[in-house]
Amino acid sequence: MTDTFPAPMTTLPIEPLPPPPPDEPSADPRWQTLRSLNRSDRIYQRVLTGFALALPFLILVILGVLFVNSLPALKRFGPSFVWTSTWDPVAEVYGAAPMIFGTLASSFLALLIAVPLALGVAIFLTEFAPRWLRQPVAFLVELLAAIPSVVYGLWGIFVLIPFLRSYVVPPLKAVFGWTPFFQGVFYGNSLLAGGIILAIMIVPYIAAVSREVLLAVPTSQREAALAMGATRWEAVRSAVLPYGRAGLIGAIILGLGRALGETMAVTMVIGNRHDIGVSVFLPAYTMAAAIANEFSEATTNMYLSALFEVGLILFVLTVVVNAVARILIWRVARGAAVGSKAL
Amino acid sequence: MLHRSLITLGIIGTLASPHLLTAQVRLNGAGATFPNIIYQTWILTYNQKFDNVEINYQSIGSGGGIRQFSDKTVDFGGTDAPMTDSAMAAIGGNVLHIPTVLGAVVPTYSLPGVTQPVKFTPDVLADIFLGKITSWNDARLTSINPGLDLPKQDIIVVHRSDGSGTSYVWTDYLSKVSPEWQQKVGRGTSVNWPVGLGGRGNEGVTATVRQTPGAIGYVELGYALINKMSVGVVRNSAGNWITPSLESVTAAAQGAMDAMGPNTDFRVSLTDSPGAQSYPISSFTWLLVRKDYPDAAKARELLKFVWWSLTDGQAKAAGLGYAPLPKEMRPWIEARLRAVTAAGRPAWRGPVTAGTSQ
């Protein structure tokens, strides 16, 4: 019965629009309405484009200012600035190696401690917590992010360091004292204290984003794993975590970015010493802490320029870390988690 | 209608703020953090007496103060370390260093169980901070502290991580008393410390010293007095053991006056100064004032304020932990201030005597 089947609509039952009158475009009322819509739409579009371009422009301006102000130091020290360990304002010899090492080491240590903790919190909140407990615990974890950095620093000096000295370091030395990472005397202000404070500060960021990622994993994945006979832990490990891999990596990199730039809390507990040491009991220095401490009293132009160069290195490091995170997420996203809402 | 309401608003605004009608001189200053407390006290008290001038001082650090003074963004600066010759040449020498109060830096330590103050000789202090003396029961410490039972404990040095005038005075003293320190480290607001942890500000050093048994650091005298910290006793160049106090700091300035002479430009270091009762780690803190100002009214008001702080204001120093300048220094400073010109003519006619007005 093909003749009763509706015929394909090759012609639209709508009159075509009249061609625009060439001489008096504003006289036709239909064109007037369309043109005014276009004008306000154009303005709307241009304003939003302006806002959107302002932020990358600001980043370029910051980069430009950092670069221009660090030119004297770049010319004087060249690439050796990155691997020189001496920081001597009297002799005007500057080298950022201890600060770069300290920034990377404290952030890495913080991630080592924070990632299992934050992922554990996120998994607990999505898988195991009773419903009435989820919101309060999530709220308290996120409250950690609201505590000011200086308060963390004060708490670190007066509570954390004595606690570490009395209860944490002796067992660590007893068990791991043979490794180079736990040798030497612990005086309090150290890389270990800095790393722990940073870990506590980045846990809420990683936990909050991970929780969102894990919540976005469809329950069908979990149910399929459980139906195959997996235990709760195996279901999470084999079905849930790989599904949200991209988002979890993004969360970890978010935490790393926060840790790289953290200033006040770190400078109060890390010991502020321009030295590279393998042991976590030794004092260290980070780039952000050095800039914050020395900028206001930097008397000579070369000193200021060297500090600007440290700022430039920190800026570039943060950009590189975020770029690597982006690339990782794209690569991982093209793999197992295609179509995952968790992205 | 709009026109009329604007006029009404304007009239109300003018009537409501009587200060707008009097000649209000605004003075801006910035610089050292060490004297900030007394400068703010002086500004407050001065404003209660003379409300025609508005003074504003921001403690951003000596380096920032020198920079802003040189860039002419402030009318006066504050610094704990004098400007270098090259920095002064860069602004054509248009600067005067006017000392305002005296400060001192004291060694502070944490030795629970040791109740009497520990004595330090200059070379022992230098070698502790060089990392050559590492234990509290070292022979050199026990020999100068015969009555004390110093424990066998590591000495943990604590210094300032932020650049500061306090570090400048401390390293200036160590450079004078130890040739090895002078050659290895030198003097500066920020130096390459051979050993030790860095604390941020006087508060950071204090907190670190307090929390670390066996630590030794250095802080401002006023800070140590107000917080009742255990301070060490230092031997001065005359061979006497001096307990840090405000009187011994003023004595250090008096002891240095012979070498300075009345034509001094006050860019003088007071560390290790002569005098039987001088505390050896003392220093001036200076206000930076221009030799020539473009605005006569501002110059006159500024110099009136500076002279007031050098006379009536000195009474407030001791209560806040600062040592007052010796009275004998006032005529010298007055001579410097009288030489300040504004548009070619002297900006200040001298101290106000009772019955006259300026």
Image (cartoon, rainbow, N blue to C red):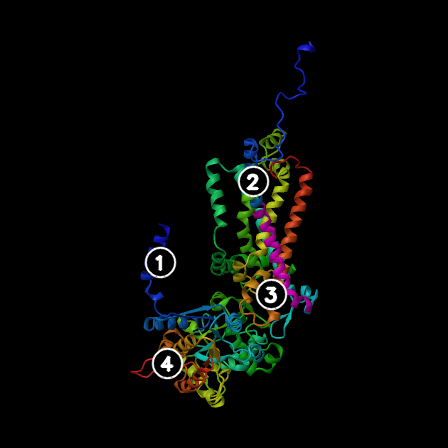
Q: CA distance from mark 2 to mark 4?
A: 71 Å
Residue A27: x, y in percent? 55, 34
Q: CA distance from mark 3 to mark 2?
A: 49 Å
From the image, tell me which residue sits under label 1: B10
State left or right for residue A10 relative to residue B109: right
Give the residue type at disc 2.
Arg
Is mark 3 in CB contact (under 8 Å) with mark 4?
A: no
Same-chain check, marks 3 and 4: no
| Residue B262 located within the stretch drawn in magenta | no
Mark 2, chain letter?
A: A
Q: Which residues are magenta?
A: A49-75
Instruction: For residue B282, say whether it is visible.
Output: no
Give the residue type at disc 3.
Leu
From the image, tell me which residue sits under label 2: A39
Mark 1, chain letter?
A: B
Q: CA distance from mark 3 to mark 1?
A: 49 Å
Instruction: For residue A231, say whether it is visible.
Output: yes
Label 3 secondary element: helix
Tell me the mark number nearer the camera, choosing from 1 and 4: 1
Give the residue type at disc 4.
Thr
List the single residue furthest toward the top. A1
Label 4 secondary element: helix
Label 2 secondary element: helix
Tell me the mark number nearer the camera, choosing from 2 and 4: 2
Residue A109: x, y in percent? 60, 54
From the image, tell me which residue sits under label 4: B311
Question: Which mark sits nearer the N-terminus, 1 or 4?
Answer: 1
Depth check: give the residue in front, B58 or B36. B58
Same-chain check, marks 2 and 1: no
